Image: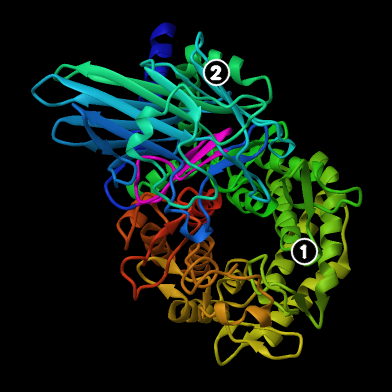
Amino acid sequence: MKNLFLLICFLSVAIAFSQTKEKLKIQFNGDAQIESGSFYAGLEFHHSYPLPQRISFYYPVANSIDLSRDYWKRDSSLVMAMCVETDGKKEWVNKESTPYTLTPYSVSFHNESSDRLLNISYEFCKNKPAFVVTIELKNISSSVKNYRLFTELQLALRTSHTFAIKDKASSSFDEVNGILLAKYNDRETQNAELFITNAGEKPSSVSGVSSIVKLPLETDNWWSDDSFSEFSNYLPDNNPGLAAGKFLYEKKLNPGESLIIVQIIGSAKSGEGNSIAQYLQKNYNNEVNEFSNYVIDYAGSGNIKTGDSILDRSILWSRAMLAVNKHYIDGSIQPMPCPAEYNFYFTHDVLLTDLAAVKFDSARVKNDLKFILSHADENHVIPHAYYWKDSAFVTELATPDNWNHFWFIIVSGMYTAKYNDKQFADELYPYVSKSLTETLHGYKDSVMYAFRPDWWDIGRNYGPRSYMTILAVKAIEEYNSLSGLLGKSNDSLKIIADNLRIGLDKTLWDSNKKYLMNYFEDGSQDTHYYMGSLLAAHFKTINADKINEIVKTAKEKLLDPAIGVYTVYPMDFQNLGEYLKLVGNEAGDPHKYINGGVWPHSNAVYALALIAAGRKQEAANFIKQTMTIDGIINSPNGQPAMYEYRNSNKNNPSEYGKVDKPQFMWAAGWYLYCIYELFGE
């Protein structure tokens, strides 16, 4: 009987695992931006091209392969090229939009013509700094065909912070073990080695010299038909240059037969590349399976379900994203915003995600808070960011008007209250106390003054801010909760919180606009409607009547019913660079990025405001339409994504709804937070 019970339990777990795995698989055919990655590497694709525009490595430090010359046009350049030759006829597949199958931990492209099927999949290792590209070329014609397949991967690096081009490497090929190495004798890359090895079909020809003449690129189509002839060339240590991994594979295939190529690509410390590559030649399948199993297990271990298949699939997807979006940094694995584009640890991104995680993953939140403490300074000031810069890891500390202080206090208070962790509360206390002291320098006239316009770390024009005032009230409440756990209290802080509520009501609330507005130091009103003001409804720092009014105003001014809530209205930051002291085009063009784009937390705080107003069904419908994987797919220019932001320009159908950074960590966090607020505790 005991064995039967164990068998039933095992089968139950296996079935649940299989069901979760299937729900984390999406097939899509359309123009899309894609990011996929792991702790050690990340890939970025645009327009559903089957070859990457960017490869990011995080070990030994954050280096990337990226040939773009303009961040806003980074979709135009590729770092890899591929050509299929069938009976002498060449076909470059580089810039061909291709149907794909996406999971949070892998992506596979499916390119089919009349006589051949080309599947290209990208998977990632769990414990080793590498990813695996599997290429299947299948003869689906009715006759024997001679195939040649050529790949070229550029190996020039860009550094993490300054994005400097590093195009001087030596290259060599180990004939015995079949390993191509490119070595960088450059401190800014931490002397990284890049390696490529083959675990499937062996190449007939190899080269370690790029087809590109020089960088920066003079043309985005850097590959050429004569690439096939440039083999057996390498760059010696005494004459480094532009390195690449060039491989040619040749095989005659009968109808139904396939050529299977497996390239394992990674980055290592100096002297490690060869040994890691040799290990992965034999163990890459185990590594890939271990990573996917880890993600599927975490996704399926959640403690909340809604009964709605669309909402529940996005719960699984969100949890999977929280498992995936972590990077190696300076000896440990830490949460990072997205798989491929961010090489920096940002305290803000981690804390926003932990608003949700505190409800179901105490270990994650505690580890995150401990990491923040470990990078605070001797005065207990917490970090804003931590990253590799040129030749060392650098900590940027949170300045006194940095909202990281408030979010740090809020998450610390939520964690210690939920888990009654007095010992950790005692450890946190000097840090949260310092954060509160730092930020309250901006407290005067019953409101909070700050330099930033709303929720962003751009601009610099001092004045009363609704967003910071709302956060200050909530942070003081959480601070007092944490203090109470330790038997401490501070009546003066309660008085400040009460005064801040009065300031929101009497100073920042515009009774004509029926919205919480911002002001400049000269007393003039900032006439923009910012999404950050909606937090007042969720945190209940305004009364019930004003909650209803602020939701109504947001619906009128900020809501696009098809894709969600703008960050700001009107979208005119491009005209206010000098006044707001913006640097270049950092806010983005109208309808993009911070200048009126639709961000996940914009949608989240609107949904939370609806919940606060008692409109739960409306909130559920809004979440389902604008925040779920299925809802986003079925919206204008939709695709499988939980994104950083979307383009809101409805007057241009080709760009309206376009997604940027499609696997964004705190999009998943905010989705889960909303689900718990709506259906959970």
Is 562 left or right of 472, judged from the image as shown? left
The quadrant in which residue 60 appears is: top right
Q: Nearer the viewer, residue 424 or 650?
A: 650
Q: Nearer the viewer, residue 208 or 427?
A: 208
Residue bearing mark 1? 476
Q: Position of residue 93 (x, y in %)?
A: 30, 40
Residue 16 appears anywhere in the view: no
Is 415 left or right of 109, judged from the image as shown? right
Q: In this picture, is 220 found above or below 188?
A: below
Is 51 left or right of 533, judged from the image as shown? left
- Secondary structure at badge 1 equals helix
Q: In this picture, is 371 found above or below 531?
A: above
Question: In the rendering, which numbered label is found on residue 234?
Answer: none
Q: Position of residue 523 (x, y in %)?
A: 73, 90
Q: Nearer the viewer, residue 74 or 539?
A: 74
Measuring 39% from the left and 72% from the top, which residue is drawn there?
Answer: 649
Q: Nearer the viewer, residue 114 or 315?
A: 114
Color style of the picture: rainbow
Q: Position of residue 600 (x, y in %)?
A: 50, 59
Residue 664 appears anywhere in the view: yes
Q: Which residues are magenta?
A: 32-56
Residue bearing mark 2? 277
Measuring 29% from the left and 46% from the top, which residue is drawn there?
Answer: 96
Q: How many marks can you see? A: 2
Dot 1 alpha-carbon crowd within 10 angstroms: few under 14, some 14 to 19, many 20 or more: many
Q: Is residue 305 magenta?
A: no
- Secondary structure at badge 2 equals helix
Q: Amino acid at mark 2?
A: Ala
Q: CA distance from mark 1 to mark 2?
A: 52 Å
Measuring 41% from the left and 28% from the top, which residue is drawn there?
Answer: 230
